[in-house]
Amino acid sequence: MDGQDDIAQRVAGSITAATLTQAQVAAQIGLTDEELSESLRGLRAFSTVEIVQLAEVLKVDAQWIIIGRPDPYRLIVTARHDVDQ
């Protein structure tokens, strides 16, 4: 399996996990259903912008889509506050 196939496999799995259809995901990132299908079959490469958009829509890390590992430097913010009444 080459890099594009790995990316396509991670995207396809994320679509399934997000319980979205390919058509829904394609529409949200500005692709036709056919373009997304071609990318998932390895006939068309995802652009960098498409990968970032997919990560946002699918709620996964863009680096994970690309290399299969999450970004160790990804900023995660948790806020907590107390309100005195």
Image (cartoon, rainbow, N blue to C red):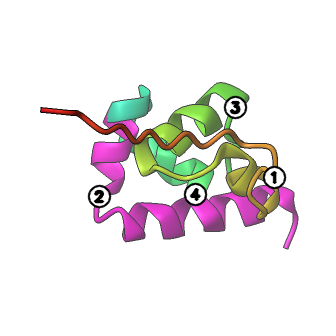
Q: Which residue position holds label 4?
A: 40
How far from the left and from the top, in percent, is residue 78? 49, 44
Which residue range is magenta in the image? 1-27
Task: Indicate yes or no whether the magenta region holds residue 53.
Answer: no
Q: What residue type is labelled 4?
A: Leu
CA–CA distance in space, label 3 to label 1: 23 Å
Element class at badge 4:
helix
Q: Which of marks 3 and 4 is nearer the N terminus?
A: 4
Q: Which of marks 4 and 1 is nearer the N terminus?
A: 4
In front: mark 2 or mark 4? Answer: 2
Element class at badge 3:
loop
Residue at image position (49%, 53%) is 37
| CB atoms of marks 4 and 1 within 8 Å | no
Q: Quadrant of the C terminus?
A: top left
Q: Which residue position holds label 1?
A: 72
Q: Which amino acid does label 3 sit on?
A: Ser
Q: Which residue position holds label 2?
A: 20
In front: mark 2 or mark 1? Answer: 1
- Extreme residue toward the right, this view: 2
Q: In which quarter of the image is residue 45?
A: top right
How far from the left and from the top, in percent, is residue 46? 67, 40
